[in-house]
């Protein structure tokens, strides 16, 4: 193997689905490959046409993986000032309507050849491994890093029988991350505590937002009016994304917030209900369809209000700070990273929310220092990722060296026992995930042990029947 480290980044979604697990892993791949001293592969799901129509917005569909790859590359190249040199591969996926998520089909470790398998980065490791049936990640890759994006427990607790489901899910997440990952990075303390985990925000913001912030700073320094609009919030329009909390606060304190105008931007299942609730307020609360936060429309707002407590690290909060805005948010673990910025105003109770909102509307934002601006960047986020992963970014650790450490006499018995227990746990998970009835009972999409003929044809894979014959022949 060459002295370059190879990073294979596996994620659970892809553009044009504008979700965090599409966008953040794409930026991570670009910035890891930026200096050319690492080989990077981004591994994303490929969906059949029927699933694409369910998932992707604005009737965007692709006839081939190469067509989607071109779309993804064009998107990222428009947002960074260098040409990223990473490769893109696709694994077969299926969309689950019940989970509103894309689930892997078959053994997705096969996307990376054994001879280059070095560091695997699993974006949403629990999600990628709930139904994993195939090669053991830690046997194939020298280092397996999981990055936890989503507070799944907070979401399921809002469902019917949520407490029971959350209890089971908590155990399942712990199980699969323990047996398949060497290290877990939790973006904030709002996520579930997992084995071998550290808390570190390894996400940055689109450089375009930092450029907007620099422009606003120049306007303020020149005595110009940098912001012509008041307060706004942007996010998927579902009650769990903070809309309930925000409208309840505005309703309760209408008399103290007289004259406040708030614009809400978002699209989602609860859009109609949010509109109706907003109309009942005496305050001016305007509801608009969702838009890209990079739209120039948002440059003129001075105050970003985000009362959501279901996010892990809210991307739009980081983007608002990067644009030089004042942010008002709840004192919650998901906002811990943002407290270092002077324009982040955190409230502990409703009275503080009211006072901070009134103050923000009458004040000018504090200028970001170069250091603070850098902390929001993807360059800084990439440095934090390398440090939190505990890996040498340049020299691959040989497997011989890894194995020799396990033979140290003082640790031999303890490590052997732990390894045997983990092997047994992996065997049990593989046995359960290999049974169609068990998979379906726990929420997997039916018939996803192997990709079907359509997915195989799209991705140039051997048909399932031929694959089985090859395996029998080898044995």
Image (cartoon, grey):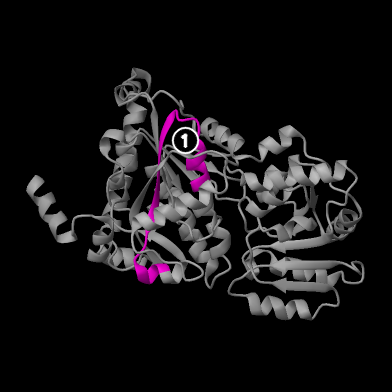
Q: Where is residue 97? Give x, y as percent.
A: 43, 71
Image quadrant in which you'd find residue 452: bottom left
Report helix, strand or loop for mark 1.
loop
Say whether residue 188 is magenta. no
- Disc 1 crowd rating (10 Å Cα; few below 14, some 14-19, many 20+) is many
Residue position for label 1 = 33
Residue 150 or residue 359, whichever sits in front: 359
> Which residue is at a point 65% across and 55% down the rendered structure image?
294
Residue 36 is one of the magenta-drawn residues: yes
Depth check: 38 or 443 in front?
A: 38
* x, y percent for residue 336: 69, 45
Q: Please give left or right for residue 226 compared with residue 243 in the image.
A: right
- Give the residue at x 76% y 62%: 232
Highlighted magenta segment, given as a residue range: 26-52
Q: Give the residue drawn at x 74%, y 78%.
A: 277
Residue 59: image location, x then y, percent: 47, 71
Disc tally is: 1
In which quadrant of the rendered image does the N terminus lie?
top left
| Side of 108 where 282 appears, left or right | right
Whether residue 475 is visible: no
Q: In which quarter of the image is residue 457?
A: bottom left
Residue 85 location (% of width, % of height): 44, 38
Q: Toward which corner of the image does residue 227 lie, by quadrant?
A: bottom right
Which residue in the rendered view is the most extreme toward the top?
Answer: 409
From what the image shows, is residue 337 above or below residue 409? below
């Amino acid at each position: 193997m060459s002295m370059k480290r190879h990073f294979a980044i596996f994620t659970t979604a892809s553009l044009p689905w504008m979700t965090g697990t599409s966008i953040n892993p794409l930026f991570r791949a670009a910035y890891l490959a930026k200096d050319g001293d690492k080989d990077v592969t981004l591994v994303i799901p490929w969906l059949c046409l029927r699933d694409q129509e369910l998932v992707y917005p604005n009737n965007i569909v692709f006839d081939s993986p190469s067509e989607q790859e071109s779309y993804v590359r064009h998107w990222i190249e428009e947002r960074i000032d260098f040409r990223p040199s990473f490769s893109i591969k696709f694994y077969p996926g299926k969309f689950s309507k019940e989970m509103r998520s894309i689930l892997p089909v078959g053994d997705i470790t096969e996307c990376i050849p054994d001879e280059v398998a070095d560091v695997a980065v699993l974006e949403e490791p629990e999600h990628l491994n709930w139904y994993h049936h195939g090669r053991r990640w830690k046997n194939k890759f020298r280092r397996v890093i999981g990055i936890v994006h989503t507070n799944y427990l907070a979401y399921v607790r809002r469902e019917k029988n949520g407490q029971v489901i959350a209890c089971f899910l908590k155990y399942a997440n712990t199980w699969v991350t323990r047996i398949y990952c060497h290290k877990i990075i939790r973006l904030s303390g709002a996520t579930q505590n997992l084995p071998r985990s550290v808390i570190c925000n390894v996400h940055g913001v689109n450089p375009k937002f930092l450029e907007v912030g620099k422009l606003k700073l120049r306007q303020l320094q020149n005595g110009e009016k940098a912001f012509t609009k008041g307060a706004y919030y942007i996010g998927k329009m579902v009650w769990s994304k903070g809309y309930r909390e925000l409208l309840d606060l505005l309703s309760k304190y209408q008399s103290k917030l007289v004259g406040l105008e708030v614009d809400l931007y978002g699209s989602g299942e609860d859009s109609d209900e949010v509109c109706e609730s907003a109309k009942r307020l005496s305050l001016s609360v305007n509801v608009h369809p969702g838009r890209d936060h990079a739209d120039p429309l948002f440059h003129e707002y001075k105050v970003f209000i985000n009362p959501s407590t279901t996010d892990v690290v809210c991307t739009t909060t980081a983007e608002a700070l990067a644009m030089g805005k004042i942010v008002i948010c709840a004192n919650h673990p998901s906002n811990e990273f943002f407290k270092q910025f002077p324009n982040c105003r955190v409230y502990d109770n409703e009275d503080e929310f009211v006072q901070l909102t009134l103050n923000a509307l009458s004040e000018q934002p504090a200028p970001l220092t170069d250091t603070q601006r850098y902390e929001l960047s993807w360059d800084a986020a990439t440095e934090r990722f390398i440090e939190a992963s505990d890996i040498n970014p340049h020299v691959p650790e040989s497997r011989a060296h890894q194995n020799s450490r396990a033979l140290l006499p003082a640790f031999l018995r303890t490590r052997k026992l732990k390894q045997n227990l983990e092997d047994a746990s992996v065997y049990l998970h593989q046995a359960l995930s290999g049974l169609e009835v068990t998979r379906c009972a726990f929420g997997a999409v039916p018939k996803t042990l192997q990709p079907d003929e359509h997915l195989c044809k799209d991705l140039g894979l051997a048909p399932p029947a031929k694959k089985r014959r090859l395996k029998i022949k080898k044995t």
